[in-house]
Image (cartoon, rainbow, N blue to C red):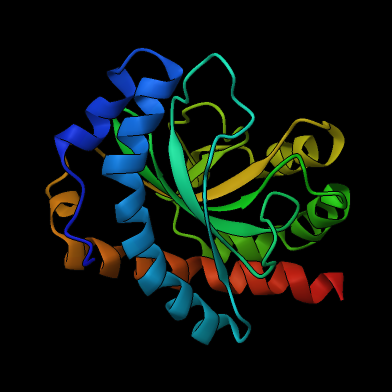
Amino acid sequence: MEFTGFEQKDFDTFQIDGLEERMEAIRENIQPKFKAIGDVLAHYLSEDIGQEMYVHIAKHARRTVNPPNDTWVAFSYNKRGYKKHPHFQVGLWDDRVFVWLAYIYELPNKKEFANIFIDEQDMLEEHIPSDYDFSMNHMKKSDEQIGKVDLKEKLERFSNVKSAELLIGKQFQANNPILQDGEKFLNEIKAIFDTLIPVFKMSLREMG
């Protein structure tokens, strides 16, 4: 399947009541698009990073009652999972698409990564465009931009608060025309990854 873009029906999925009903729509409408995105971007990331990156499409298997408010495809160098490792995400809420480099609370060595970013704060500020989006919780929408936050304070929170996370990337509102053009949006994701890959490599290099 070729990725042809996202449409309003995809975002409307999150208005469907009921866990199984919403999951059925996610499996039918969104996950095939994630598979198509994954086929392209896993190869792109693998070549650029220099090691194989695996595709992980969110299954939401832990949910038993409440339907998911967002869904995503993740890319990790670990074949078995991604949550305990730095990873890239492309996903949807009901009103936007997000593209993240993510360090989430399940990282077993999160504090070590935080210390790396604290030490390399100048690199982050110089390398990442000020209009890139920023989040500290992958389970909530965020409208913060990296150029408008106190990055030192945020990184210290990432280090000291167990639940705090670090996500950097770009978000696209559902009505953004680029989302409806599959080729153009894939190229946009690649450009975002090109900006974030040096940060990803830096964090892994410093970890040894």
The answer to whether residue 172 is seen in the rendering is no
The one nearer the camera, 73 or 97, is 73
The one nearer the camera, 132 or 162, is 162
Q: Estimate the x, y position of residue 120 in percent, counting from the top left.
A: 74, 63
- Quarter of the picture holding the N terminus: bottom left
The answer to whether residue 168 is above or below residue 53 is above
The answer to whether residue 145 is above or below residue 86 is above
Question: Which residue: 29% across, 18% down?
Answer: 15
Q: Estimate the x, y position of residue 73 in percent, counting from the top left.
A: 47, 52
Q: Estimate the x, y position of residue 30 in percent, counting from the top left.
A: 31, 44
Question: Which residue: 34% across, 63% down?
Answer: 37
- Quarter of the picture holding the C terminus: bottom right
Left or right placement of residue 163 versus residue 1 in this view: right
Question: Which residue: 36% across, 48% down?
Answer: 31
Left or right placement of residue 93 versus residue 110 in this view: left
Left or right placement of residue 163 versus residue 184 in this view: right
